[in-house]
Image (cartoon, grey):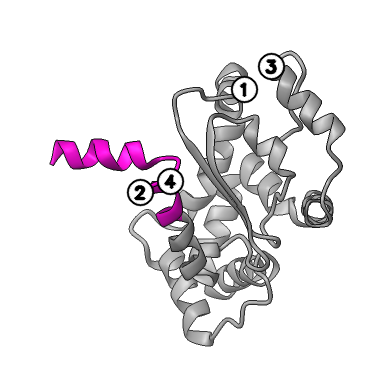
Amino acid sequence: AHKPPQFKKSPLLYLQHALTPYTEQEKQGLKRSAWFQSRGFGYNLEQGTKPSTLGFSLADSPVGMLAWIYEKLRDWTDDYPWTDDEVLTWTSIYQSSKAGANASVRIYYESRNTAEEKMLQAAGYIPRVLLGQSYFPKDLSVTPLAWGRALGPVVFQKLHASGGHFAAHERPKELVEDLQAMFGKGGGAYSVTQSFKAKL
């Protein structure tokens, strides 16, 4: 999860954050983040410590796989009205992929067992990558905007009124609009778009 700006790394951002009260939406985001850490994080611990046990179980039991996936689809969205076809499609991707269900689980183990300095580097400020941040209230970690600005040069931020972890599926129009605002003419990452055009 993201953390508040630190004085040693970003003194100006730290002071800004310390002096600016959280908005109501940011307070609700912190509540959502706390809920996830206390009530929804078990999957992460299991996948990060015993991936093969879980992977074999998911591959062996289609009903187990359905329960495992559906729980996330239900808990991590903003009351999205999943149809049976959507749920079965998402589950089938995991069940029928060439890599198998274990591939989606194993990455948690790999990241948990990576050298600590690499993990700290990945979670730290990245100076040369322009960042855009779309906040959906039912995502898993919904932190105040200032926390996001501690990750790198943020050129786009937007708080959305609805949506969750699977925003590309739940709120595709809003996400596309965010990308257009960020990379379009006048957007903070328009220079990236221009560099791609120049290469064509």
Q: Secondary structure at mark 3?
A: loop
Residue 195 in the magenta stretch? The answer is yes
Is the magenta region chiefly helix, strand or loop? helix
The residue under label 3 is 9
Instruction: Say whether disc 2 or disc 3 marks the residue closer to the N-terminus.
Output: 3
| Viewer-nearest of discs 2 and 3 | 2
On residue 185, which mark appears? 2
Q: Quadrant of the C terminus?
A: top left
The residue under label 4 is 187
Say which amino acid is labelled 4.
Answer: Gly
| Distance between the alpha carbons at the discs numbered 4 and 3 | 27 Å
Q: Are marks 4 and 3 in contact (CB under 8 Å)?
A: no
On residue 44, which mark appears? none
Q: Secondary structure at mark 4?
A: loop
| Viewer-nearest of discs 4 and 3 | 4
The residue under label 1 is 120
Q: Are marks 4 and 2 in contact (CB under 8 Å)?
A: yes
Q: Does residue 184 appear in this view?
A: yes
| Distance between the alpha carbons at the discs numbered 2 and 1 | 34 Å
Local packing at callout 2 (Cα closer than 10 Å; few below 14, some 14-19, many 20+) is few
| Distance between the alpha carbons at the discs numbered 1 and 4 | 30 Å
Say which amino acid is labelled 3.
Answer: Lys
| Distance between the alpha carbons at the discs numbered 4 and 2 | 5 Å
**Residue visible at 63% across and 67% down in the picture:** 163
Residue 43 sits above or below residue 72 on the image:
above
Q: Quadrant of the N terminus?
A: top right
Q: Are marks 2 and 3 in contact (CB under 8 Å)?
A: no
Residue 113 in the magenta stretch? The answer is no
Q: Residue furthest left?
A: 200
Instruction: Say whether disc 4 or disc 3 marks the residue closer to the N-terminus.
Output: 3
Say which amino acid is labelled 1.
Answer: Leu
Instruction: Say whether disc 2 or disc 1 marks the residue closer to the N-terminus.
Output: 1
